[in-house]
Amino acid sequence: MDHDFIFEARQARVLFGAGRIEALAGEVDRLGAKRALILSTPQQRAQAENTVRRLGNTAIGIFDQAVMHVPIETARAARAEAKRLNADCCVAIGGGSTVGLAKAIALVTGLPIVAIPTTFAGSEMTPIWGLTEDGIKTTGRDARVLPKTVIYDPELTLTLPPAAVGTSGINAMAHSVEALYAENANPVASLMAEESLRALAVSLPKIIAQPEDLAARSEALYGAWLAGLVLGTVGVALHHKLCHTLGGSFAMPHAEIHTLILPHAAAYNAAAAPDAMARVARALGVQNAPAGLFDLAVSVGAEMALSEFGMTEADLDRAAEIALTNPYYNPRPIEKGAIRALLDDAYYGRRPDM
């Protein structure tokens, strides 16, 4: 096999296992930090308060206003709070919204991040930041925003509602699917991507069927960790462009939209990336990758029609136009009519049959 690639590893210290949260204080101390600002969403305030108790006098405050897509106003408020408290690190407990807010702080301050994921999204392993301003979501890569330490404790995911389990995990799977046909795909990332897809495809239905299954939650976190590693080393394509468009410009929920769009983006690229689709199908144990992704999402209770999230048919034309602006690399050329047809399939929740 002819290999021609560039691989650049970006490392974070990872602690993985049930009960690992008890190591938090030592990990913050390991960074030399003495004034930790705790970040969370409003809904996860109780977990933030538990984090304060674990850190004792090292915790100097809580900022609990993290929201999806990191609005620039929220980022500015959090940066101002970090400055006011003279914080020397951020501890982010939660999912992509909270980790994203920590990254927005680090982007301009350089403060180190300790991330404690409570979902299966995987963004804590990437140097990718995102900010939404005036209805447009902008993303970029910067080494400053990669967390220094990530603590994966499956026990912390037990409070994740069943409805969020599946979409959170399939959000991570989207990173791995696109890694297989990324412009800078490489053998190491592809191995991790396929293993990530396998782990998540096996574990997510088990969690839905038996929410207390800690082994399944551990397997899902393992898959999410791998997906995050993958996203940190390769680029993204059409799927992420569409989700950034729908999230930033139409205020669509993050994980739910990643879950809904993924089968359609895979179908769009299937003929242009047959080897990638074969690996996705193998990881899922199915014959057809786009249909298999759709069926998995349905099996974990995901809503698969954009019409159910407040979009209208009239919005689809605008979404297609925005998606054509500054398009990401994609193995199949981005064509307006085809993108509009993809969005129409997603709007009505049609199963890809290929």
Image (cartoon, helix red, strand yellow):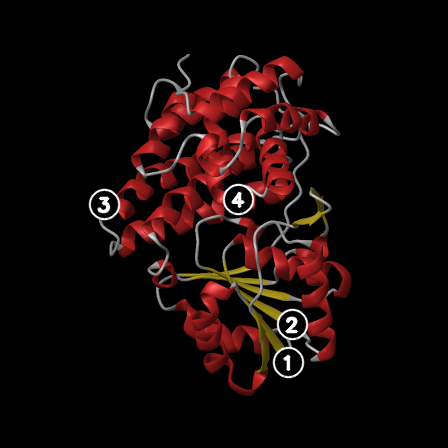
* Tag in front: 4 or 3: 4
Instruction: Name the N-terminal-most of marks 4 and 3.
Output: 3
Q: Nearer the viewer, residue 9 or 223?
A: 223
Q: Is residue 192 visible?
A: no
Disc ID at residue 209: 3
Count up the numbered dots: 4
Q: Amino acid at mark 1?
A: Arg
> Residue drawn at (36%, 68%), measured in percent from left and top?
19
Q: Nearer the viewer, residue 278 or 52?
A: 52
* Tag in front: 4 or 2: 4
Does the CB distance between marks 4 and 2 fall below 8 Å? no
Name, please, the residue furthest toward the left. 210
Disc ID at residue 35: 1
Instruction: Point out residue 188 in the picture as x, y percentages from the top left corner.
Output: 55, 36
> Residue drawn at (28%, 46%), measured in percent from left and top?
208
Q: Which residue is mark 2?
A: 89
Instruction: Name the N-terminal-most of marks 3 and 1.
Output: 1
Q: Nearer the viewer, residue 284 or 101?
A: 101
Disc ID at residue 258: none
Quarter in which the N terminus is drawn: top right
Does the CB distance between marks 1 and 2 fall below 8 Å? yes
Q: Amino acid at mark 4?
A: His
